[in-house]
Image (cartoon, helix red, strand yellow):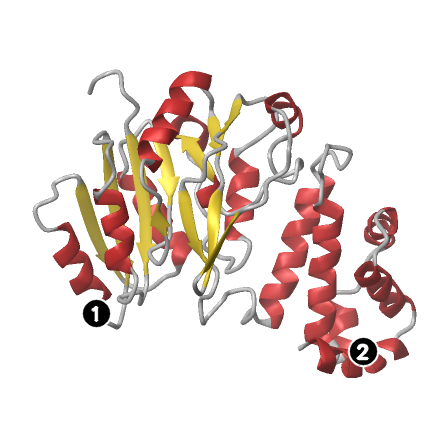
Amino acid sequence: MNNRIFISIIMPAYNTEQYIGNAISSVLKQNYEDYELIIIDDGSTDGTFQRIQEAICNHPQCKVFHKANEGVSSARNTGLSHCKGQYVYFMDSDDALLPDALQTLAACVADCKCDALLVRGILQLSNQTKKQKVPNVTNENLSQYGPIACGWPTFVWNILFSKEIIGNNKFNERIHIQEDTDFIFATCKPGLVYGKCSKPIYAYRTDRQESALSTISRNDAINCKNIRYLIMVNSDITAPHCKLVKEYGDACFGVLRRTASTPDLYYKEAHLTQKQKLYLKKRLSIKNAIVLLANRYKFLINMFKLLNYFLS
């Protein structure tokens, strides 16, 4: 291997036959050659695996693994166990890299010699595209507080990770929501060297018919709240652009929406402690106020059923 940065791209896939050909093509068309593409078919039941085989034919830099369906975290962990790059980038099988993305990543890493490079993408909705919003935060702030505390988006495609900081970290296969956030928090700690890439390098599809955020179960919503709380209490919420309290409040509100029909369950599984209430009071919003009132007055949960009707 020469002195150029070698990048491992990990792409889990499940039932994305309509999009995966374009996703793979966007990688193979890059003008940067020092990479490997690792595709993990997570037990697809449609034509995804066939599309993968067709797309990677005669491309030795591509590796494909076919496994039983165990979820995106398991698939990404399979990729991590086989990758050889100095840096690791995760992408989804229904998204795409923009032209010159890998060249841009490699140039930025060579320039800042960072442990993790924070990137941005464009958001695609039907025929419309717009640049992803990211906070105007300095590299020094990122090193002091960590990217999550500074409000950086928590999709794994928003970060190019050095293999060194990943170490033995794995995606938590027991959770089915916020797995990206959980992995980033475990990997991108304060004290590391961070860099930023201002040029968008990724096209993220936002019009998916089966959005994880719109179909999450009650238990997943509770897990989301718990993860958000652990991240919040283990971070410095005075960091610039910090949104951790707001995001925790949003997660609490999501739990309330999914348990409003069963108040007893809400009080058993999602009732807030005094310490948790104090955090919500620090960044009071309409959603936080509703959650706090529902925790104080049990009869209000029944009234929330009507509000939930208009919010759904």
Q: Is residue 177 above or below residue 304?
A: above
- Residue 304, numbered label: 2
The one nearer the camera, 129 or 101, is 129
| Quadrant in the picture for the C terminus | bottom right
Residue 28: quadrant of the picture = top left
Q: Is residue 265 above or below residue 236?
A: below
Q: Earlier in the sequence, mark 2 or mark 1?
A: 1
Question: Nearest the camera: 151 or 220?
Answer: 151
Q: Position of residue 212 (x, y in %)?
A: 51, 65
Q: Quick one: label 2, few (<14), some, or many (20+) residues within 10 Å?
A: some
Q: Report, in whole angstroms, how far the alpha carbon at label 2 lies from the one at label 1.
A: 44 Å
The amino acid type of the residue labelled 2 equals: Phe
Secondary element under disc 1, as helix, strand or loop, is loop
In the picture, measured across the screen, residue 123 lies left or right of residue 22, that is right
The quadrant in which residue 285 appears is bottom right
Q: Secondary structure at mark 2?
A: helix
Image coordinates of residue 209 in percent, x first then y, are 45, 71
Asked whether residue 69 is in view, the answer is yes
Q: Residue at x 13, y 58 (%)?
A: 54
Which quarter of the rendering shows the N terminus? top left
Nearest the viewer among 129 and 74 is: 129
**Residue name at image x 91 percent, y 67 percent:** 296
Q: Is residue 167 visible?
A: no
Q: Is residue 214 left or right of residue 210?
A: right
Q: Which mark is residue 47?
A: 1
* Amino acid type at image mark 1: Gly
